């Protein structure tokens, strides 16, 4: 299965998706229009080694909620990720049993290779 969890109005996600084209057989899920399910998040966490690697500390809500001053557990990360899409480090690209999280050049290149292999 090939799937990309992204934010439709995020220019970085749009650029990366365009860079990954052609996207034959890839399912795109805009996490704002179609929120992630608990099962989807659990699958991502099992592939990435937990909920923390999926969590974005760059989200504006992170500071607004004062989360930088708190010790967060895996359950906290899971709860926050399910409550608000903004906490997901984007995009998340699944290719079979591989996961690529975030928008670093290295991650995007590895995802591109996996999507087209």
Image (cartoon, helix red, strand yellow):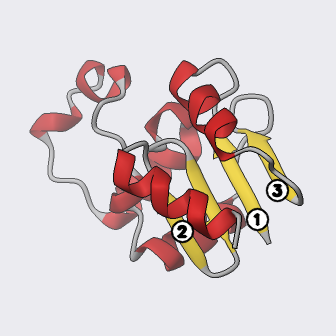
Percent x, y for residue 8? 70, 25
The N terminus: image quadrant: bottom right
Left/right of residue 72 with respect to residue 38 in the rendered view: left
Q: What element does badge 2 sit on?
A: strand
Q: Alpha-carbon neighbours of circle 3 within 10 Å: few (<14), some, or many (≥20)?
A: some
Residue at 58% across, 22% down:
10
Q: What element does badge 1 sit on?
A: strand
Dividing the picture into quadrants, the one containing residue 70 is top left
Disc 2 to disc 1, how far (Cα)? Answer: 10 Å
Dividing the picture into quadrants, the one containing residue 33 is top right
The answer to which of 72 and 105 lies nearer the viewer is 105
Does residue 97 sit above or below 84 in this rendering?
Answer: below
Are the residues tagged 3 and 1 within 8 Å (C-beta)? yes
Task: Determine which of the numbered discs, if any, sits on residue 74 in the image.
Answer: none
Residue at 48% across, 63% down:
110
User: Outermost residue toward the right?
Assistant: 25
Does residue 14 sit above or below 113 in this rendering?
Answer: above
Q: Name the residue under label 3.
A: 26
Q: Name the residue under label 1.
A: 2
Q: Alpha-carbon neighbours of circle 2 within 10 Å: few (<14), some, or many (≥20)?
A: many
The C terminus: image quadrant: bottom right
User: Outermost residue toward the left?
Assistant: 69
Percent x, y for residue 16? 57, 37
Left/right of residue 64 with respect to residue 107 in the rendered view: left
The answer to which of marks 2 and 1 sits earlier in the sequence is: 1
Are the residues tagged 3 and 2 within 8 Å (C-beta)? no
């Amino acid at each position: 299965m090939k799937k990309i969890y992204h934010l439709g109005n995020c220019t970085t996600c749009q650029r990366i998706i365009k860079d990954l084209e052609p996207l034959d057989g890839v399912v795109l899920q805009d996490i704002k229009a179609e929120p992630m399910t608990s099962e989807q998040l659990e699958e991502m966490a099992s592939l990435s080694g937990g909920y923390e690697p999926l969590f974005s500390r760059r989200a504006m809500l992170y500071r607004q909620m004062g989360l930088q001053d708190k010790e967060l557990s895996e359950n906290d990360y899971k709860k926050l990720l399910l409550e608000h899409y903004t906490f997901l480090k984007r995009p998340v690209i699944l290719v079979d049993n591989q996961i690529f999280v975030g928008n670093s050049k290295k991650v995007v290149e590895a995802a591109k290779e996996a999507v087209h292999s």
